[in-house]
Amino acid sequence: MKLGVNIDHVATLRQARGTVYPDPLDTAILCARAGAHSITAHLREDRRHIQDDDIFRLKELQPLPLNLEMAIVESIVEIALDVLPAEVCLVPEKRQELTTEGGLDVVAHFDSIKSTVQILLESGIDVSLFVDADEMTIAACKDTGARTIELHTGTYCDAGPNERAVQMEQLIRAADYAHSLGLRVNAGHGINLENLGGILCIPHLDTLNIGHSIICRAVFEGLEKAVKEMLEAMQDYEG
Ligand code: PXP
C-alpha cells in the first residue's frame, strides 16, 4: 500500500502570514526523502492555501507523482490541462466548508463529471473520484470511465465508537464492490495514527492520502528542535 501526503496545511500556515515560507515544495521534497509515494495538493477556487504557482512548481521541481485535488471548475480544469499532473482527484467544493465535507454525487452530476473525466484522461492524466461508500455512486464512477475511486473515510474517522462498526462495514463493502468493477481503490480524509488500524481493515487499498494528522504531528516532532535552535542562536547576545 502507498502513502500520498496532502500538503495543503503547510500552505495554510504560509498564507496566514503572507510569507514565502513554509514552502509546500520543500515539504514535498522532505516527504519524498521520508519515503512517501505521492504528493496531494488541493487547488481550491478560493485559493485559501495552495496557489497556482505551487501546483506548477510541485509538478516540475520535486520527484513524486502529483495528485491534484480539484473541483469541476472550468478555470481549474484548464490549469490541470496545462500542468498535466500524474493524477487528478475530483472532489466537491463548497466555499464555506473547513475541509472537503463529503464525496461527489456522481449520480446527480453524472454528465459534467463524465465529460471532465474524459477530457483529463485524453490528456494522459489519471483520474480519481472522491466518493462516499455507496454502491450506486461507485457504479456511476465506473461509467464515467474513471479508473480510480478515493473512498471518503472522514465519516468513519469522526464516528464515535458505537457507530464505527457500521461505517467500516460500508467501507469494506464499497471497496469490495469497486474492486469487482476493476476500479483502483484509494482512501482518505481524517486518517491518523489512532484510527489507522481500523482503516487497514478495508480491502484492496492502493493508496492512503493523509494530510492533517501528519502535518500536526510534524509540529510536535519538530518543536523541541526549533526552540533549541532559536535559543542557541540567541546565546551570543552581549547587550
Ligand atoms: N483526500 C481528499 C479527497 C481530501 O479532500 C483530503 C483533505 O484535503 C484528504 C484526502 C486528506 O485528509 P486529511 O487532511 O484529513 O488527512
Image (cartoon, rainbow, N blue to C red):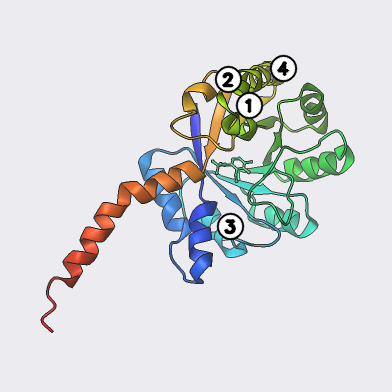
Q: Is residue 75 above or below residue 214?
A: below
Q: What type is the residue that disc 2 sits on?
A: Ile
Q: What type is the residue that disc 3 sits on?
A: Ile
Q: Quadrant of ligand 1?
A: top right
Which element type, helix, strand or loop, lies under badge 4? Answer: helix
Q: Residue at x 59, y 19 (%)?
A: 204
**Which is more N-terminal, label 2 or label 4?**
4
For this rendering, which residue is in front, 122 or 217? 217
Using the numbered discs, state the Cα–Cα distance from disc 4 to disc 2 in whole angstroms: 12 Å
In the image, residue 124 lies at what x, y percent? 69, 42
Q: Residue at x 36, y 44 (%)?
A: 33
**Which is more N-terminal, label 3 or label 2?**
3
Mark 4–mark 2 contact, CB under 8 Å?
no
Which element type, helix, strand or loop, lies under badge 3? Answer: helix
In this figure, which residue is indicated by the disc labeled 3?
Answer: 55
Mark 1–mark 2 contact, CB under 8 Å?
yes
